[in-house]
Amino acid sequence: MWGENTQRIVLFGLSCLLSMPLLYGCAGQESGPPEPKEANASLKMVYVNSVEAAESPLRAKKVLLRIQGNLPSPAYEFQEFKVQLSGRSIDITPLAHYVEKKAVIQMLVPFDQVCTIDDMKPGNYEVKVHGKGGQGTLTTSIVVVK
């Protein structure tokens, strides 16, 4: 049926395929507890597309801002907002945790999160949302009422 050389090639190919899991280990879930995340060591900036008030009017007790954008790949998990309030300026940086060991296809992953800022004084504020890449910083103005 098959020539002797063809049989040798097929057997060699099969032996290579069958030995790969032994040489490289089995792919899949790691066993044991997850490794603890170092505080902010693996947090990365993400792409931002828009910022808008999540409700109207914005109340001083709790200001809600809806921020939309994209994570660089499925290996990123949205984590938190870094918020700095200085006078009438609010700087917001959305941050995501990057999972290095996660094998993923390279594609953007949309996110839609609400940033909450508590106990603000009424007045006009300039909001800057800092993102990664060419989109850079988005700036908008908000009015906070009592």
Image: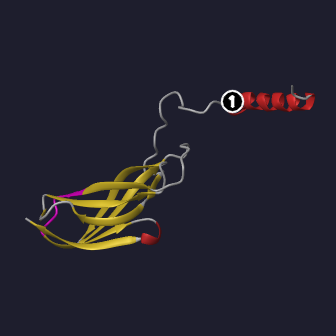
Q: Image quarter for residue 81?
A: bottom left
Q: How many marks?
A: 1
Q: Is 71 situated above or below 16? A: below
Picture coordinates of residue 19 (x, y %)? 74, 28
Q: Say whether residue 106 is left or right of residue 93.
A: right
Which residue is pictured at 24% across the width and 65% down the height?
52
Depicted 26 relative to depicted 49: above or below = above
Q: Quadrant of residue 8?
A: top right
User: What amino acid type should be assigned to the residue bearing mark 1?
Assistant: Pro
Direction right: furthest residue: 4
Whole-percent x, y for residue 72 in the image = 47, 57
Q: Which residues are magenta?
A: 116-122
**Circle 1 crowding by C-alpha within 10 Å: few under 14, some 14–19, many from 20:** few
Pick whichever, 131 or 21, lies toward us: 21
Of residues 81 and 41, the one drawn nearer to the viewer in this rendering: 81
**Display colour scheme:** secondary structure
At x 35% / y 52%, what residue is drawn?
80
Q: Assign a secondary structure to mark 1.
A: helix
Magenta stretch: includes residue 74: no
The structure residue drawn at horizontal position 53% and vertical position 43%, both measured from the top left corner, is 102
Which residue is painted at 42% across and 70% down in the image? 135
Across and down, in percent, residue 64 comes to 20, 59
Q: Quadrant of the N terminus?
A: top right
The residue to which callout 1 is attached is: 21
